Amino acid sequence: MTKITNLTNECLAIGSLPHKSVKEAMDIVKTYYNIIPFCPQLPRLSPKEDMILQYLENMAGLVLDEENGTVYLDTDKETFSEELETLFLTYEEATQDINSESLDNYCLTNEYSKSFDAYIELVQEIKPQYAKTQITGPFTLATSLTDKSQRCAYYDETLKEVIVKTLALKVLWQIKEIKKVSPNTTPIVFIDEPTVSQIGTSAYVTISPNEIVEYIKEISDIIKQNSGISAIHCCGKCDWSIPLKIGMDIINFDAYSYAENMGAYANDLKNFLDNDGFIAFGVVPTLDKEALTKTNLIEIEEHFNQAKALLINKGIDKNLLNTHSLISPSCGCGSLSVELAQKANSLTKELSEKLKG
């Protein structure tokens, strides 16, 4: 398994940007995230870069009607059996050998990621120690998609397996592409799971947290087995015992709004840090446009220090926390204006540089 080194108080981004130009988006990456470059999702440039749609290409049973704006999975589709067989065969091959040619059937094409080619070119050029990419989490995707009867895909065991294994193959393909152009670069793969914050609510009261752990862990383990760093992002008031049980390398949370929520899981968090886990503090408020408009570096640093102090007061070792912290926005910037996105990423970089200095 790959161990994280040389990243104390480094900054990293969360997937999305509001730009309609790949060049402008990559300028953000180069300016603020040259240590950990990331592949930006650009939903305003293409609707297929929305986090629910971006990783659906070639998924077994997929029906995407762009004209009517409908998307669902259909197990009665004429080609479903053939697509399912291809999926499971490819999964078996690619998890044994990431260089399997069949893995290319689950690539990210330009239609679904306009910036991936430019991102890979940047990784090839600068050969960073780390490079970040992401995938939609299996729980979030399975509870967002339906079958043709509008029944949640999560409650169909076959569709749930289709979703988990397709996402795993999309992850493996991204790792392969990074390693192809820069063999010494370590991929950091974020599993974006905003819907985990809804566990325990009336909408998901029947769902077992242990089952969610199982499906996320399948993807996390595949990342680790292929020399990657496994990370998870949840921007809400989350039951952090779920990701902390998985054995992730990095957990990213909204430290601007939910530091007390994280403090409630201090015992699990201590074990996580003792096992060389890193916490990415999302201290720049991208989900609150008014707060972002008014804030400045001094205030952001205060939020960071308060969040850390809260965890230390809960029994987390101060020195361990100081050496296992990262800085990020609270969530992606895709819903912001270009100007506010610029500010959010600038503040993230500025705080990181100040803390490292």
Image (tube, rainbow, N blue to C red):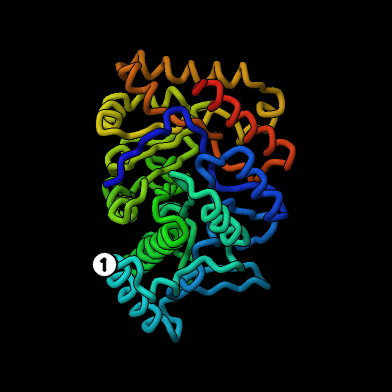
Query: Residue 346: where, in percent of width, then height?
Result: 64, 32
Residue 248, image quadrant: top left
Can you say whether 215 is above or below 110 in the image? above
Can you say whether 101 is above or below 131 in the image? below
Q: Amino acid at mark 1?
A: Gln
The residue under the point 55% across, 62% down is: 53
Q: Is residue 168 left or right of residue 267?
A: right
Q: Is residue 142 visible?
A: no
Query: Residue 290: where, in percent of width, then height?
Result: 70, 29
Q: Nearer the viewer, residue 51 or 78?
A: 51
Q: Nearer the viewer, residue 251 or 200?
A: 251
Count of labels in the image: 1
Q: Nearer the viewer, residue 258 or 301?
A: 301
The residue under the point 50% across, 42% down is: 36
Callout 1: 10 Å neighbours few (<14), some, many (20+)?
few
The residue under the point 72% across, 54% down is: 20
The residue under the point 35% across, 13% down is: 313
Callout 1: helix, strand or loop?
helix
Can you say whether 354 is above or below 280 in the image? above
Query: Residue 281: where, in percent of width, then height?
Result: 47, 29
Q: Is residue 51 left or right of residue 202?
A: right
Residue 340, image quadrant: top right
Q: Is residue 40 visible?
A: yes
**Residue identified by numbered label 1:** 96
Q: Is residue 256 left or right of residue 289?
A: left
Query: Residue 356: where, in percent of width, then height?
Result: 49, 23
In the image, farthest residue toward the bottom: 78
